[in-house]
Image (tube, rainbow, N blue to C red):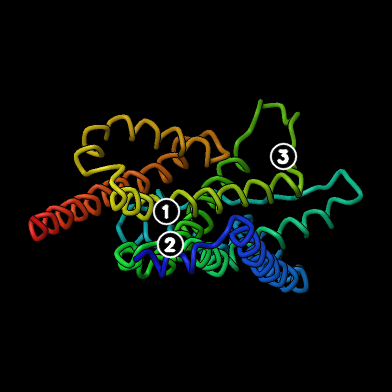
Amino acid sequence: MRNTQSKAEMTFIDHLEALRWHLVRAMIVWLTAAIAIFIKIDWIFDNIIYAPAHNDFVTYGFLCNLGHQLHLGDSLCMPPINIQLQGNTISGPFMSAMSISMIGGLILAFPYLFWELWKFIKPALSPKELKYSRGSIFWVSLCFFTGAAFGYYLLAPFTFNFLANFTLGTQGAYKYMPTLDDYIDSLNNIILGCGISFELPVMAYVLAKIGLITANFLKTYRKYAFVIILIVAAIITPSPDWTSQIIVAVPLLLLYEISVIITARVDKQKRKEEKQWS
């Protein structure tokens, strides 16, 4: 039985009421996380948001030391970076602080927000579907945070380093001074874009379970998927350099291949179950 007939067949109004309370609880947790970040906004901006624009950011030193250990010289050492942000509106700092707080609260509260979504969907699932979805909150959250960390620690430094050291002309007519909101928007897009993109294996698992895709389907359309991945990489990376786009594209290609493996295992399990029932 489908979860006790969805608790005695809830009416449309009952579903709306349940959805309302899920949204209310999710909003409360999101706003609580955003307020907590806003209270510490100065420390968060100096040590987290603005950190990739500093020469002493952990990624720069790690890659440079790695290059020396691999006897590659300074090939992995990126040029010095010095990004000075400017504002051109009175409300700029406050609105940027609000943006940091809201996006940061969304990232911080992501597991709970997904849990509320899961609680809303759960009554409509059958016991078999519930069995398949065990651990979904953990895996979805893990993929999201892994992608967010990848964007923050690897893609953002490469992107900002390239843009900060890119020059236009030889007469010094152009002075690079990006605005505060442009920097924050770029960082937010990188982190959220990578976080969402890294959900590819989870999405493949779900679609395979409900029968919308198979491993053969993914293998057949692999070449088209690679083109789409390259386009997505170009969208995620605000900088036009090929290095940043490759940094995004390679993990996405690996995630696609992981999705093929996961889907193949799902197909194998389905065939096994069909033999048991036949």
- Whether tag 2 and tag 3 are in contact, CB under 8 A, the answer is no
- Residue 138 is drawn in which quadrant? bottom left
Which residue is found at the position 36% from the left and 30% from the top?
Answer: 227
- Mark 2 lies on residue: 140
Q: Secondary structure at mark 1?
A: loop
Residue type at the position of mark 1 = Glu
The residue labelled by disc 1 is 199
Separation (CA) of disc 1 from disc 3 = 35 Å
Q: Which mark is residue 86?
A: none
SS class of the residue under badge 3?
loop
Q: Is residue 233 above or below residue 195?
A: above
Camera-side mark, 1 or 3 = 1
Q: Nearer the viewer, residue 245 or 201?
A: 201
Q: The residue under label 2 is which amino acid type?
A: Val
Judging by the rendered image, the residue that carries numbered circle 3 is 176
The image quadrant where one finds the C terminus is bottom left
- 148 left or right of 262 in image: right
